[in-house]
Image (cartoon, rainbow, N blue to C red):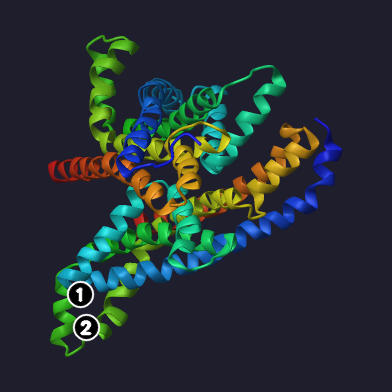
Amino acid sequence: MQIYIIIQYLPDFLKAALETLKIAFFSACIALFLGLVLATVNQARIRLLSVIIDTYTIIMRSTPLLVQLYFIYYGLPLLGVQVDPYVSSVIAFSLNTGAYVVEIFRGGLEGIDNGQFYAAYSLGMGWFACLQYIIFPQVIQRVIAPLLSQFSYLIKDTSLAAVLVVQELTYTYRNVSSSTYRPMEALVIPMIIYFLLYIVFRLASMSFETKKASRG
Amino acid sequence: MFFEDISILHQILRLGKAFLINLSFLPIVLLIGLILGSVIAVVRYYRIRILSQFFSLLVEIIRGAPFLLLVYATFFILPNIGISLSPFGTGVFVLSFTSSAFMSEIFLSGLRSIDAGQYFAADSIGMNFFQKMTLIIFPQMIKLTLPSIVGQVIMTIKDTSIVSLVGLAEVVRTSRQMSLLTQNSFLAFLIVGGYFFIICYPLILVSKNLERRLSTRH
């Protein structure tokens, strides 16, 4: 172990960590929005829309993220849309995570008794008001733990942006390890950063899980 | 330079052949994952001192690290300590490692969800540890955890694509080369996606089906 290499490249790694977080944050926001909207639309049970949403989630969940990333980065220009690596990786990650978020919200919605809807309707609430005041507050409690663990996967998945030469943590690892010929030293900091991020999300997810369990 | 005209059929066949490399990881990775995973799970279930803590830490570290980083690290670090692995060997190593970690997590939750009475009953009729595990506990545990095991298999299949990034000429890498050659990345990646879909989608259905059957029985 040569500690000076670790210290020398620490600023680079911290900058890269920020990049990783940025990609993960934007992707998480878009995925959350996408998942919420699609799950809600799905709840309305309009045949054609449900089929489209199902197709989307099935395709995203049964193909590798790397293929999706390539597809977007190399495929979109053929449709005449030029995208830079950063944007295309955010698109790929949010579409991928969005599919899982839809499933999580769907599970949360399915767990809610239909009587809740009928009760709200009988009070004269509309569909949207019912979702807003009655359903979502209950759904959010159920989905928060799985969402957090899904986002911890997302942070790990952002490492694939390295393939498109986005200068995030994994790319920086590869770079430092090949320019110093010290792959072992180069691994220490990114490993610690990824691990800390993972642990934060996991503990948060677990705390919500136990809260839910103790509430019954 | 190899082919002037690459027909769609030709691409499908060539990529199909390359996809077999992805699938060829499965038997060995699954076998190692099942064996190592259950050993680690048993050690952690019985809280065998030091070994248990060591495995728990190892599992958390593997679960916390991106798969790509693990692949890169294996490929570039092992030669430093005198072990030179081919891209395929790297794939087998990393996939087995991660699969064991995730399997152990699955099995541990399975072991914990089996009623303690089962353990006591096996002890009380004089079974030894090995008999108890193989005849009483494991068969029940496997049944309980089957949906998650199938989920893990799906993850392994999808992860094989990432091994292409250290030079394994599997389906994703082949499709990249092909798309450069034909200037039609859309088609090449569509075919690759199709291959993964054909294998993974039925598995997702199987996993869901198993889960439903489990939940209705209880």
Horizontal side of A57 relative to A192 (left or right) equals left
Residue on which the image places disc 1: A44
Q: Give residue B15's position: percent from left, percent from top.
A: 37, 36
Residue at point 63%, 46% (across, down): A170
Residue on which the image places disc 2: A127
Chain of the residue under label 2: A
Callout 2 environment at 10 Å: few (<14), some (14 to 19), or many (20+)?
A: few
Q: Could you give the CA–CA distance between mark 1 and mark 2, rounded to whole angstroms?
A: 9 Å
SS of the residue under disc 2: helix
Nearest to the observer: residue B168 or residue A45:
B168
Mark toward the viewer: 1 or 2: 1
Circle 1/circle 2 CB separation < 8 Å: yes
Give the residue type at disc 2. Trp
Task: Please identify the quarter of the rendering in which residue B17 is found.
Answer: top left
Task: Please identify the quarter of the rendering in which residue B132 is found.
Answer: top left
Q: Is residue A184 above or below residue A107?
A: above
Residue at point 61%, 36% (across, down): B72
Which quarter of the rendering shows the C terminus of chain B? top left
Q: Is residue B1 above or below residue B186?
A: above
SS of the residue under disc 1: loop
Nearest to the observer: residue A112 or residue B103:
B103
